[in-house]
Protein backbone atom coordinates (compact mmCIF):
# COMPACT_ATOMS: atom_id res chain seq x y z
CA UNK A 1 0.00 0.00 0.00
CA UNK A 2 3.00 2.32 0.14
CA UNK A 3 2.82 4.68 3.14
CA UNK A 4 -0.73 5.91 2.70
CA UNK A 5 -4.19 4.99 1.50
CA UNK A 6 -7.09 7.12 0.34
CA UNK A 7 -10.21 4.98 0.67
CA UNK A 8 -13.52 5.66 -1.08
CA UNK A 9 -16.66 3.78 -0.02
CA UNK A 10 -19.82 2.69 -1.78
CA UNK A 11 -23.29 2.79 -0.24
CA UNK A 12 -26.20 1.10 -2.01
CA UNK A 13 -24.03 0.53 -5.04
CA UNK A 14 -22.78 4.09 -5.41
CA UNK A 15 -19.87 6.00 -3.96
CA UNK A 16 -20.94 7.89 -0.87
CA UNK A 17 -19.84 11.52 -0.56
CA UNK A 18 -21.59 11.98 2.77
CA UNK A 19 -19.23 13.41 5.40
CA UNK A 20 -21.27 11.77 8.16
CA UNK A 21 -20.62 8.33 6.61
CA UNK A 22 -16.88 9.03 6.53
CA UNK A 23 -16.85 10.11 10.18
CA UNK A 24 -18.69 6.93 11.18
CA UNK A 25 -16.15 4.78 9.33
CA UNK A 26 -13.21 6.66 10.86
CA UNK A 27 -14.49 6.48 14.42
CA UNK A 28 -16.06 3.01 14.43
CA UNK A 29 -13.30 1.25 12.51
CA UNK A 30 -10.03 3.16 12.37
CA UNK A 31 -10.17 4.82 15.80
CA UNK A 32 -11.75 1.84 17.53
CA UNK A 33 -9.83 -1.09 16.06
CA UNK A 34 -6.57 0.42 14.78
CA UNK A 35 -6.10 3.03 17.51
CA UNK A 36 -5.65 5.65 14.80
CA UNK A 37 -5.05 9.27 15.87
CA UNK A 38 -5.76 12.54 14.11
CA UNK A 39 -3.75 14.91 11.89
CA UNK A 40 -0.12 14.03 12.70
CA UNK A 41 0.08 15.93 15.99
CA UNK A 42 3.42 16.03 17.86
CA UNK A 43 4.14 12.79 19.70
CA UNK A 44 1.92 10.60 17.51
CA UNK A 45 4.77 8.29 16.52
CA UNK A 46 4.43 4.65 15.39
CA UNK A 47 0.66 4.78 15.04
CA UNK A 48 -1.78 5.20 12.18
CA UNK A 49 -2.79 8.78 11.52
CA UNK A 50 -6.11 9.85 10.03
CA UNK A 51 -6.71 13.06 8.13
CA UNK A 52 -9.74 14.88 9.56
CA UNK A 53 -12.39 16.68 7.54
CA UNK A 54 -11.11 20.06 8.76
CA UNK A 55 -7.74 19.32 7.12
CA UNK A 56 -9.15 18.07 3.85
CA UNK A 57 -10.40 14.44 3.79
CA UNK A 58 -14.11 15.11 3.52
CA UNK A 59 -15.58 12.50 1.19
CA UNK A 60 -12.91 9.83 1.63
CA UNK A 61 -10.81 8.29 4.41
CA UNK A 62 -7.08 8.99 4.36
CA UNK A 63 -4.78 7.13 6.73
CA UNK A 64 -1.03 6.60 6.66
CA UNK A 65 2.07 5.35 8.45
CA UNK A 66 4.38 8.23 7.60
CA UNK A 67 5.09 8.92 11.28
CA UNK A 68 6.33 5.36 11.85
CA UNK A 69 10.04 4.95 12.57
CA UNK A 70 12.13 3.68 9.66
CA UNK A 71 12.60 0.26 11.26
CA UNK A 72 8.86 -0.34 10.96
CA UNK A 73 8.75 0.65 7.29
CA UNK A 74 10.92 -2.21 6.06
CA UNK A 75 9.62 -4.28 3.13
CA UNK A 76 8.84 -7.23 5.41
CA UNK A 77 5.96 -5.26 6.97
CA UNK A 78 4.28 -4.52 3.62
CA UNK A 79 2.24 -7.43 2.26
CA UNK A 80 2.53 -7.58 -1.50
CA UNK A 81 1.68 -11.19 -2.43
CA UNK A 82 -0.73 -13.91 -1.39
CA UNK A 83 1.11 -17.07 -0.33
CA UNK A 84 -1.02 -19.49 -2.40
CA UNK A 85 -0.54 -18.08 -5.87
CA UNK A 86 2.26 -15.53 -5.44
CA UNK A 87 0.45 -12.99 -7.60
CA UNK A 88 0.58 -9.35 -6.65
CA UNK A 89 -2.57 -7.89 -5.10
CA UNK A 90 -2.90 -5.50 -8.04
CA UNK A 91 -2.76 -8.41 -10.52
CA UNK A 92 -5.43 -10.28 -8.54
CA UNK A 93 -7.68 -7.22 -8.39
CA UNK A 94 -7.40 -6.65 -12.13
CA UNK A 95 -8.00 -10.34 -12.78
CA UNK A 96 -11.40 -10.21 -11.08
CA UNK A 97 -12.41 -6.93 -12.67
CA UNK A 98 -11.51 -4.57 -9.82
CA UNK A 99 -8.95 -2.52 -11.73
CA UNK A 100 -9.94 0.75 -10.03
CA UNK A 101 -9.55 -0.75 -6.57
CA UNK A 102 -5.77 -0.86 -6.84
CA UNK A 103 -4.99 2.14 -9.01
CA UNK A 104 -1.84 2.81 -7.00
CA UNK A 105 1.00 4.83 -8.51
CA UNK A 106 2.54 6.03 -5.23
CA UNK A 107 1.41 8.29 -2.44
CA UNK A 108 1.52 11.47 -4.53
CA UNK A 109 -1.37 10.69 -6.86
CA UNK A 110 -5.11 10.83 -6.41
CA UNK A 111 -6.65 10.35 -9.85
CA UNK A 112 -4.74 9.64 -13.05
CA UNK A 113 -7.71 10.79 -15.14
CA UNK A 114 -7.75 14.24 -13.59
CA UNK A 115 -11.22 14.18 -12.06
CA UNK A 116 -11.84 16.52 -9.15
CA UNK A 117 -13.64 15.57 -5.96
CA UNK A 118 -15.22 19.02 -5.78
CA UNK A 119 -18.21 19.78 -8.01
CA UNK A 120 -17.53 23.49 -7.68
CA UNK A 121 -14.76 25.72 -6.42
CA UNK A 122 -15.01 26.96 -2.84
CA UNK A 123 -13.77 29.92 -0.82
CA UNK A 124 -9.99 29.57 -0.40
CA UNK A 125 -10.37 30.61 3.25
CA UNK A 126 -12.05 27.25 3.85
CA UNK A 127 -9.20 25.23 2.34
CA UNK A 128 -6.13 23.67 3.93
CA UNK A 129 -3.38 21.79 2.14
CA UNK A 130 -4.48 18.20 1.63
CA UNK A 131 -2.44 15.18 2.67
CA UNK A 132 -1.55 14.62 -0.99
CA UNK A 133 -0.40 18.21 -1.27
CA UNK A 134 1.73 17.81 1.86
CA UNK A 135 3.26 14.59 0.54
CA UNK A 136 4.04 16.28 -2.78
CA UNK A 137 5.76 19.26 -1.14
CA UNK A 138 7.78 17.24 1.36
CA UNK A 139 8.94 14.85 -1.35
CA UNK A 140 10.27 17.70 -3.48
CA UNK A 141 11.83 19.55 -0.55
CA UNK A 142 13.17 16.38 1.11
CA UNK A 143 14.15 16.42 4.77
CA UNK A 144 17.69 17.27 5.88
CA UNK A 145 18.35 17.27 9.60
CA UNK A 146 21.64 19.18 9.34
CA UNK A 147 22.04 22.74 8.00
CA UNK A 148 22.68 22.91 4.25
CA UNK A 149 22.77 25.50 1.48
CA UNK A 150 19.78 25.70 -0.84
CA UNK A 151 20.06 26.46 -4.57
CA UNK A 152 20.48 30.16 -3.75
CA UNK A 153 23.28 29.40 -1.25
CA UNK A 154 21.07 30.27 1.72
CA UNK A 155 21.40 28.33 4.97
CA UNK A 156 18.46 25.95 5.22
CA UNK A 157 17.33 22.96 7.29
CA UNK A 158 14.51 20.42 7.45
CA UNK A 159 11.98 20.66 4.62
CA UNK A 160 13.41 23.82 3.07
CA UNK A 161 13.14 25.93 6.24
CA UNK A 162 15.21 29.09 5.72
CA UNK A 163 17.73 29.75 8.50
CA UNK A 164 19.44 32.77 6.96
CA UNK A 165 20.06 34.52 3.65
CA UNK A 166 23.75 33.82 4.30
CA UNK A 167 25.44 30.48 3.60
CA UNK A 168 26.07 27.78 6.17
CA UNK A 169 29.82 28.32 5.83
CA UNK A 170 29.50 32.04 6.51
CA UNK A 171 27.32 31.46 9.57
CA UNK A 172 29.76 28.89 10.94
CA UNK A 173 32.78 31.09 10.22
CA UNK A 174 31.20 34.04 12.05
CA UNK A 175 29.84 31.82 14.81
CA UNK A 176 26.37 33.12 13.99
CA UNK A 177 24.57 29.86 13.28
CA UNK A 178 21.52 29.81 15.60
CA UNK A 179 22.25 27.52 18.53
CA UNK A 180 19.16 25.37 17.98
CA UNK A 181 20.44 24.38 14.52
CA UNK A 182 24.17 23.94 15.17
CA UNK A 183 24.01 20.22 15.88
CA UNK A 184 21.07 19.54 13.63
CA UNK A 185 17.44 18.85 14.49
CA UNK A 186 15.24 15.81 15.03
CA UNK A 187 12.70 14.54 12.50
CA UNK A 188 9.91 15.76 14.77
CA UNK A 189 11.47 19.23 14.91
CA UNK A 190 11.70 19.19 11.12
CA UNK A 191 8.02 18.25 10.94
CA UNK A 192 7.10 21.06 13.33
CA UNK A 193 9.08 23.59 11.27
CA UNK A 194 7.37 22.36 8.13
CA UNK A 195 3.87 22.71 9.58
CA UNK A 196 4.73 26.20 10.82
CA UNK A 197 6.10 27.24 7.41
CA UNK A 198 3.12 25.63 5.69
CA UNK A 199 0.70 27.63 7.83
CA UNK A 200 2.54 30.84 6.94
CA UNK A 201 2.39 29.91 3.25
CA UNK A 202 -1.33 29.12 3.38
CA UNK A 203 -2.09 32.39 5.13
CA UNK A 204 -0.01 34.28 2.58
CA UNK A 205 -1.90 32.60 -0.24
CA UNK A 206 -5.29 33.46 1.27
CA UNK A 207 -4.29 37.11 1.50
CA UNK A 208 -3.28 37.21 -2.16
CA UNK A 209 -5.96 35.02 -3.72
CA UNK A 210 -9.58 35.87 -2.99
CA UNK A 211 -11.26 33.81 -5.71
CA UNK A 212 -12.72 30.32 -5.10
CA UNK A 213 -10.47 27.33 -5.81
CA UNK A 214 -10.59 23.59 -6.19
CA UNK A 215 -8.56 21.69 -3.57
CA UNK A 216 -6.01 20.73 -6.22
CA UNK A 217 -5.61 24.36 -7.33
CA UNK A 218 -5.05 25.43 -3.73
CA UNK A 219 -2.47 22.66 -3.22
CA UNK A 220 -0.56 23.61 -6.37
CA UNK A 221 -0.43 27.27 -5.35
CA UNK A 222 0.72 26.37 -1.84
CA UNK A 223 3.52 24.24 -3.29
CA UNK A 224 4.56 27.11 -5.57
CA UNK A 225 4.63 29.69 -2.78
CA UNK A 226 6.27 27.32 -0.29
CA UNK A 227 9.09 26.90 -2.80
CA UNK A 228 9.29 30.41 -4.26
CA UNK A 229 8.17 32.46 -1.24
CA UNK A 230 4.85 33.98 -0.21
CA UNK A 231 5.98 37.35 -1.57
CA UNK A 232 6.59 35.89 -5.03
CA UNK A 233 6.46 38.55 -7.73
CA UNK A 234 4.30 36.98 -10.44
CA UNK A 235 1.82 39.69 -11.44
CA UNK A 236 0.44 37.82 -14.45
CA UNK A 237 -0.30 34.74 -12.36
CA UNK A 238 -2.21 36.64 -9.70
CA UNK A 239 -4.00 38.85 -12.23
CA UNK A 240 -5.27 35.77 -14.06
CA UNK A 241 -6.45 34.31 -10.76
CA UNK A 242 -8.16 37.55 -9.79
CA UNK A 243 -10.01 37.42 -13.13
CA UNK A 244 -10.85 33.73 -12.61
CA UNK A 245 -8.78 32.82 -15.66
CA UNK A 246 -7.64 29.58 -14.11
CA UNK A 247 -6.09 27.91 -17.16
CA UNK A 248 -4.10 31.02 -17.99
CA UNK A 249 -2.93 31.20 -14.38
CA UNK A 250 -1.68 27.63 -14.56
CA UNK A 251 0.44 28.47 -17.60
CA UNK A 252 2.23 31.18 -15.60
CA UNK A 253 3.68 28.53 -13.27
CA UNK A 254 6.00 27.46 -16.08
CA UNK A 255 7.87 30.78 -16.09
CA UNK A 256 8.81 30.68 -12.40
CA UNK A 257 12.03 28.70 -12.83
CA UNK A 258 14.98 31.01 -12.06
CA UNK A 259 16.25 30.95 -15.65
CA UNK A 260 19.99 30.66 -16.10
CA UNK A 261 20.65 29.23 -12.64
CA UNK A 262 21.75 25.77 -11.56
CA UNK A 263 18.27 25.10 -10.21
CA UNK A 264 16.42 25.87 -13.47
CA UNK A 265 16.05 22.23 -14.56
CA UNK A 266 14.73 20.97 -11.22
CA UNK A 267 12.40 23.96 -10.87
CA UNK A 268 11.06 23.42 -14.38
CA UNK A 269 10.23 19.83 -13.43
CA UNK A 270 8.51 20.91 -10.22
CA UNK A 271 6.49 23.61 -11.99
CA UNK A 272 5.24 21.11 -14.57
CA UNK A 273 4.15 18.77 -11.77
CA UNK A 274 2.39 21.65 -10.02
CA UNK A 275 0.57 22.53 -13.24
CA UNK A 276 -0.55 18.90 -13.47
CA UNK A 277 -1.94 19.14 -9.94
CA UNK A 278 -3.61 22.48 -10.65
CA UNK A 279 -5.24 21.35 -13.90
CA UNK A 280 -5.77 17.63 -13.39
CA UNK A 281 -5.56 16.88 -9.65
CA UNK A 282 -2.65 14.62 -10.57
CA UNK A 283 -0.24 14.34 -7.63
CA UNK A 284 2.74 12.59 -9.23
CA UNK A 285 6.13 13.52 -7.81
CA UNK A 286 8.48 11.51 -10.01
Image (cartoon, helix red, strand yellow):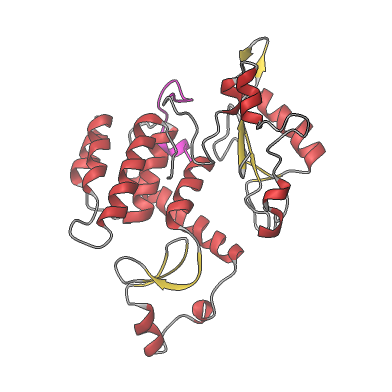
* Quadrant including the N terminus: top right
User: Image point 46% across, 80% down: which residue?
Assistant: 178
In the image as oriented, which residue stretches furthest toward the top? Answer: 12
Q: Is residue 108 left or right of residue 47?
A: left
Question: Could you say where residue 192 lies in the image, as x and y percent from the top left?
Answer: 56, 61
In the image as oriented, which residue stretches furthest toward the bottom? Answer: 174
Q: Is residue 209 magenta?
A: no
Q: How many marks?
A: 0
Question: Could you say where residue 253 lies in the image, as x and y percent from the top left?
Answer: 26, 43
- In which quarter of the view is residue 164 placed? bottom left
- Which residue is at the front of the view, 139 or 265? 265
Question: Could you say where residue 132 lies in the image, as x and y percent from the top left?
Answer: 51, 41
Vertical arrangement, residue 279 with respect to residue 128, above or below:
above
Q: Is residue 126 magenta?
A: yes
Look at the image and give the residue range highlighted in magenta: 115-129
Q: Is residue 18 visible?
A: no
- Which residue is at the front of the view, 278 or 1? 1
- Which residue is at the front of the view, 225 or 141? 141
- Main SS of the magenta segment? loop
User: Image point 62% across, 29% down: which residue?
Assistant: 90
* Quadrant including the C terminus: top left
Q: Is residue 57 visible?
A: yes
- In which quarter of the view is residue 187 placed? bottom right
Vertical arrangement, residue 82 with respect to residue 190, above or below:
above
Question: Could you say where residue 251 lies in the image, as x and y percent from the top left?
Answer: 23, 37
Amino acid sequence: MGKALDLHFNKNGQRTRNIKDMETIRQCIFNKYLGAKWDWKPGQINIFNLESTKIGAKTWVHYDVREFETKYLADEFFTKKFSKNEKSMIAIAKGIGLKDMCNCLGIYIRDTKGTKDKEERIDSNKLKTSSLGISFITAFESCKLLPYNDSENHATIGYGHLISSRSVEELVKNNSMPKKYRNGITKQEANDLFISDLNVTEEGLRKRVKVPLFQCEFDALVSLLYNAGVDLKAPKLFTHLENKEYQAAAEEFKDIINRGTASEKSLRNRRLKEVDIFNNSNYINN
